[in-house]
Image (cartoon, grey):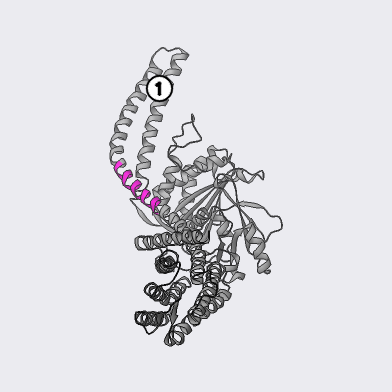
């Protein structure tokens, strides 16, 4: 049973080693995978020799091969441990490889080992060179791991702990076998090689660690790949919209001509002919249908041209919004309130396209029964966030996820084409911005309406911002389900948080917790409060239905639930530079 188990484990380790090597050679995940794969393959070959080639008695030829392999273990293990810890000591690694090469040459002579009647016996040179070298390595590696374990982050401690346990097993087995070679007979007659058992246990533990790391890297790459796919789709969409615009302009012209003729004749019949009320209604329907067809064609044309900016220049946002209200909604100026909008704030954009955006926003809100529409501006570094909030009927959780999809409308039968919100999004994104919608109805606190968060890059020709700087925000990943969505909301307002796996990973030397806002799951919040008692700016993230994320400010006693949004992020940062 023992032999079968050893054979099975050895086969698994060989297969996993080859997988790690192939993956790293083809995909370039992390150099440590390649070095570990080679190390694990060599130790599997070492074990395979004992298990399959010389299970009963040792031969000088295969024993020499095993010792050549063993001589390189300290160098290879040290090398990939340095890579995992993001540190380098190439002088030490080169020296260890040099020693391994020297021992390899010596092992193919009779200076180190020679056969006896029962076992392979060591020479004096072996006992005073290779034995001390391996003993020092077996002591130094655990000490190295313990020292780094005590001062490492929590994310590295798991890796180091598994290596430490594995090295202890390997060291115990190696020491017993060294004693066997020195004394010339087995310590335990029934067990041929303790090093094999130690190596297999070490290989299993470390293979688990690297498999876990590989899974994490693959998940992160899937998220990145998803973003690249989305960017590629947007590029294709722009190209298709250009082609659509060219053909739509011609089609739209013809449709409007035909609709004008139909509408004209319908109106002529309605005014001149003697018609019953029933027939007048039919003629009116024909005219209205022709008008809707013309309007729909116009919407398609606007959709195709949404990303094409013909007159992009620096413009102040306050006069734009104010002019839009005065020109298009003169009777609703009391209902549309502009709050806290700095008249000097400028963006780089196309006036007519942005005017179209705000006209549609106000029009949609008023059609949804809003009696008050407020516009608030938040500025941080190079991003301007406009928060447009209304008290209309709002929308359901399911509707909020489809608002910006093409041809999706909540006004079926009322003249809605389903392109208005999509056109708005395309225009905003063509300005380098982003729009997101949050329904107040989902908070279940009696409020209703829609909140639109619109982010624009601030126009500032003089100031150059650092693109890689971190903001005073910490995001703890552990326990968060919709991590990609949360990071996306941060990115919409160009906030770059420090992202850590666990509370224990927070490095107070790099992060000033007193000036930082911390976002975490409820489980991490409890640990955080125990570890950092004085920390006040803490926000608990809660998962809702339909991928809606809620957040609670733990510093406040009322524990009001908010929708996690761009507005919430900026309002809860301690400083608003610029």
Image height of 102 relative to 324, above or below: below
From the top left corner, tell me how far across and down residue 148 is, in percent.
54, 76
**In the foreground, 578 or 88:** 88
At x 65%, y 67%, the residue is: 535
Q: Quadrant of residue 517?
A: bottom right
Dominant secondary structure of the residues highlighted in magenta in the image = helix
From the top left corner, tell me how far across and down residue 571 is, in percent.
58, 59
Image height of 344 relative to 369, above or below: below
- First to last magenta residue range: 228-243
**Which residue is under mark 1?**
286
Image height of 263 relative to 408, above or below: above
| 573 displayed left or right of 288 | right
| 187 displayed left or right of 232 | right
**In the foreground, 512 or 335:** 512
Q: Secondary structure at mark 1?
A: helix
From the top left corner, tell me how far across and down residue 215 is, in percent.
47, 58
Q: Residues within 10 Å of mark 1 (few under 14, many from 20)?
A: some
From the top left corner, tell me how far across and down residue 328 is, in percent.
47, 42
């Amino acid at each position: 049973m023992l032999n079968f188990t050893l054979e099975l484990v050895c086969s698994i380790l060989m297969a996993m080693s080859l997988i790690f090597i192939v993956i790293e050679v083809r995909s370039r995940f992390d150099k440590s995978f390649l070095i570990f794969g080679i190390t694990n393959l060599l130790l599997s070959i070492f074990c395979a020799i004992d298990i399959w080639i010389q299970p009963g008695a040792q031969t000088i030829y295969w024993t020499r091969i095993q010792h050549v392999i063993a001589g390189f273990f300290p160098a290879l293990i040290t090398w990939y441990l340095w890579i995992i810890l993001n540190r380098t000591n190439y002088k030490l690694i080169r020296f260890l490889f040099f020693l391994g090469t020297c021992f390899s040459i010596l092992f193919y002579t009779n200076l180190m080992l020679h056969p006896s009647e029962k076992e392979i016996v060591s020479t004096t040179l072996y006992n005073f060179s290779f034995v001390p070298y391996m003993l020092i390595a077996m002591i130094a590696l655990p000490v190295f791991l313990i020292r780094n374990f005590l001062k490492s982050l929590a994310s590295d401690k798991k890796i180091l702990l598994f290596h430490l346990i594995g090295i202890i097993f390997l060291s115990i087995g190696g020491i017993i076998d060294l004693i066997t070679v020195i004394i010339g007979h087995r310590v335990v007659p029934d067990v041929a090689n303790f090093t094999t058992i130690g190596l297999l246990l070490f290989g299993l533990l470390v293979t688990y660690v690297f498999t876990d790391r590989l899974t994490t890297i693959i998940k992160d790459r899937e998220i990145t790949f998803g973003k690249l796919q989305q960017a590629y789709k947007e590029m294709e969409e722009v190209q298709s919209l250009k082609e659509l615009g060219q053909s739509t302009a011609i089609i739209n012209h013809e449709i409007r001509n035909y609709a004008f003729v139909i509408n004209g004749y319908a109106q002529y019949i309605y005014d001149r002919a003697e018609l019953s009320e029933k027939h007048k209604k039919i003629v009116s329907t024909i005219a209205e249908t022709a008008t809707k067809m013309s309007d729909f064609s116009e919407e398609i044309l606007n959709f195709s041209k949404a990303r094409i900016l013909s007159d992009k220049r620096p413009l102040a946002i306050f006069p734009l919004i104010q002019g839009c209200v005065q020109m298009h909604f003169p009777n609703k100026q009391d209902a549309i309130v502009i709050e806290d909008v700095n008249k000097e704030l400028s963006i780089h954009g196309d006036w007519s396209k942005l005017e179209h955006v705000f006209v549609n926003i106000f029009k949609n809100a008023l059609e949804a029964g809003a009696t008050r529409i407020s516009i608030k501006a938040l500025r941080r570094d190079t991003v301007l966030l406009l928060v447009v909030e209304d008290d209309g009927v709002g929308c359901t959780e399911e509707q909020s996820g489809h608002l910006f999809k093409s041809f999706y409308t909540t006004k079926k039968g009322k003249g809605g084409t389903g392109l208005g919100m999509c056109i708005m999004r395309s225009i905003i994104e063509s300005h380098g911005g982003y729009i997101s919608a949050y329904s107040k109805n989902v908070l279940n606190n009696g409020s209703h309406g829609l909140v639109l968060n619109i982010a624009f890059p601030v126009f500032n020709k003089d100031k150059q911002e650092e693109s890689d700087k971190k903001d005073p925000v910490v995001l703890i990943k552990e326990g968060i389900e919709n991590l990609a969505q949360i990071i996306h909301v941060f990115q919409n307002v160009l906030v770059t948080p420090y992202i850590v796996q666990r509370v224990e990973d927070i490095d107070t030397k790099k992060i000033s917790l007193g000036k930082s806002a911390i976002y975490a799951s409820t489980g991490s919040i409890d640990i955080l409060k125990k570890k950092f008692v004085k920390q006040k700016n803490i926000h608990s993230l809660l998962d809702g239905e339909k991928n809606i994320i809620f957040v609670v400010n733990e510093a406040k006693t009322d524990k009001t639930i908010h929708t996690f949004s761009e507005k919430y992020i900026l309002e809860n940062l301690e400083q608003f530079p610029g």
